[in-house]
Amino acid sequence: MMTMEYHNPVLLSATVDGLDIKPDGIYVDVTFGGGGHSKEIMKRLGPNGKLFGFDQDEDAFTNALPDERFVLIPENFRYIKRFLRFHNVKSVDGILADLGVSSHQFDVPERGFSTRFDAELDMRMSKKNDLDAFKVVNEYDEANLKRVFLDYGELKIAPALARTIIEAREKKTIKTTDELKLILSKFLPDQFKNKILAQIYQAIRIEVNQEMDVLKEFLEQSLEILNTGGRLSIISYHSLEDRLVKRFMKNGMFEGEPERDFYGNFSVPFKTIGKLIVPDEAEIKSNNRARSAKLRIAEKR
């Protein structure tokens, strides 16, 4: 049975509105989670419509929608093209992604995602992953730890964080989130403690789950499988994700500029739809995790 407590869907109407759903279309929700966005898509589909959901987290499978128009694929959405083809689907009319960590994943202490709980260092979105937070913290060399905190946490203190972890683990293996917090406590002044901790956790989590690589692979494949006029509706929660999404929607690339034609015009694969959408005060008040959400919508030309 689906439970909305599993994950309170952010920007629900706006995200699904952005798909401009055709009743007989084929759609994909690549971050199924608690099924909130998927349920709204299903309301707008006719009897011949189809929705595919992706989720690599085994906990999400209990939320599968009991509808023959819906298929839940238990895989990471970096494999969207491969697994849609397995279901004889080569092109779709719209793709929705609600990036980041679900409320459920934050709220289950043993997953290790939340700064609020003590837990073993894990942070895997799929328990099938070999890499976890324990390995990052205890086995990465200093240069790699520095890279993780600098690139994914955008922390200027990355070199000092890396050195402190290296020195601490030479004396004793770091096993839990509380042990990590204690080791790094000198970098956590009271007024900035939550912000810096969130950046540290985010950096490790992104590394563990290869989130930036996954997002790039997904965006490139979405361009391949969307029909002309098909929509991409994506919610991101931090600047690293949002910059990638914004840039890709603008010119279909992550770096550089698209080539100009003979007349000096850019040829870009997407048309952005509307402006950036963020939650209003009422939604943030009812769902604090919506506060950093940014929704961007694009249509394939």
Image (cartoon, grey):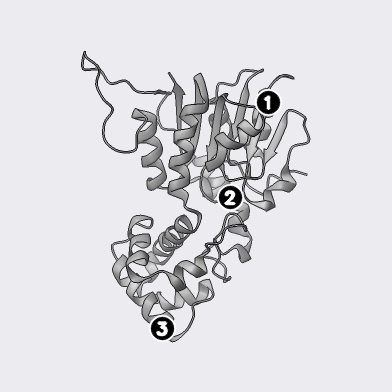
Neighbour class for label 2 at 10 Å: few (<14), some, many (≥20)? many
Tell me which label, 2 or 1, sits earlier in the chain: 1
289 over 124 or under it: above or below: above
> Callout 3: 10 Å neighbours few (<14), some, many (20+)?
few
Tell me residue 96's x, y (percent): 55, 33
Residue placed furthest toward the bottom: 171
| Secondary-structure class at tag 2 | loop
- How far across and how far down the image is residue 48, in percent? 72, 19
Residue pointed to by mark 3: 170
The N terminus, quarter of image:
top right
Q: Which residue is rendered at x = 64% and y = 37% of the image?
A: 53
**Residue denoted by label 2:** 102
- Residue at image position (44%, 34%) is 220
Looking at the image, tell me whether mark 1 or mark 3 is earlier in sequence order.
1
Name the foreground residue: 84 vs 65: 84
Instruction: Tell me the SS state at disc 1.
Output: strand
Label 1 neighbour load within 10 Å: few <14, some 14-19, many 20+: many
